[in-house]
Image: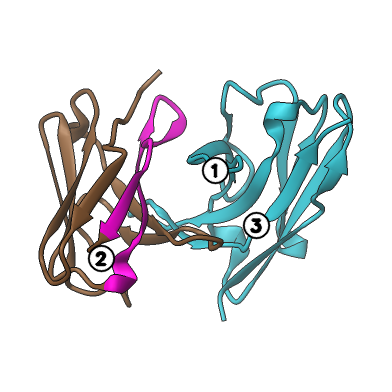
Amino acid sequence: EVQLVESGGGLVKPGGSLRLSCAASGFTFSSYSMNWVRQAPGKGLEWVSSISSSSSYIYYADSVKGRFTISRDNAKNSLYLQMNSLRAEDTAVYYCARTQLVAGGMDVWGQGTTVTVSS
Amino acid sequence: SYELTQPLSVSVALGQTARITCGGNNIGSKNVHWYQQKPGQAPVLVIYRDSNRPSGIPERFSGSNSGNTATLTISRAQAGDEADYYCQVWDSSTEVFGTGTKVTVL
């Protein structure tokens, strides 16, 4: 079964750091670009970052550029998001999602992990 | 930055057709993807590249894209189609999501 499982969320104080992980299974992880997408409470979807299959191409939303770092370990079938200098507005459910080969669109999503930034 | 505008809400009678629009500058030149999200669940891809359905998505879901508007059409609406729907495109090295539309089936 194709699956993505996020972990690492929690409560953190403003200015703090957190590292999210996404474990992939059931498909050839190293062939796919991957994404982080977040959703603040009661709000819509917001793209955070994308990374190509070999990590050659990395992109960030302006709202997280310079604070968040996306990375992957194809040997471990894992995707990561290092989040530094966290702000209250970073509070959200964070999803990892797979980009379909060729056609685009995010066809597999994890269940999400919740990040709460509060003092 | 590129923006995608969707109506806040759309209501449809059971068994009728709902149309959800996604407006963006010259969106017809881009590949548009659509997602369905039910409360407490992760999004699900229902249309990719304007008008293609992933396996497992009912034929009742269809899409079109031209000019400045992309449209997701839900035919013969069912109670289970009640959800939030988001369009999405890739523009200038960023993924952009629409503002989202809440579909209510009456």
Q: Chain of mark 3?
A: A
Observer-nearest residue: A61 or B101?
A: B101
Q: Residue at x 64, y 43 (%)?
A: A55
Give the side of residue A53 with respect to residue A78, left or right: left
Whole-percent x, y for residue A62 in the image:
58, 21
Residue B77 lies in the magenta-colored region: no
Q: Do discs 3 and 2 share a chain?
A: no
* Residue at the spot of label 1: A42
A107 to A68, vertically: above or below = below
Is disc 1 surrounded by few (<14), some (14 to 19) or many (20+) residues within 10 Å? few
Mark 2 element type = loop
Q: Chain of mark 2?
A: B
Query: Which label sits on residue B53?
Result: 2
* Colour chain A appears in: cyan
* Residue at the spot of label 3: A112
Q: Chain of mark 1?
A: A
Q: Residue at x 82, y 53 (%)?
A: A8
Observer-nearest residue: B96 or B99?
A: B99
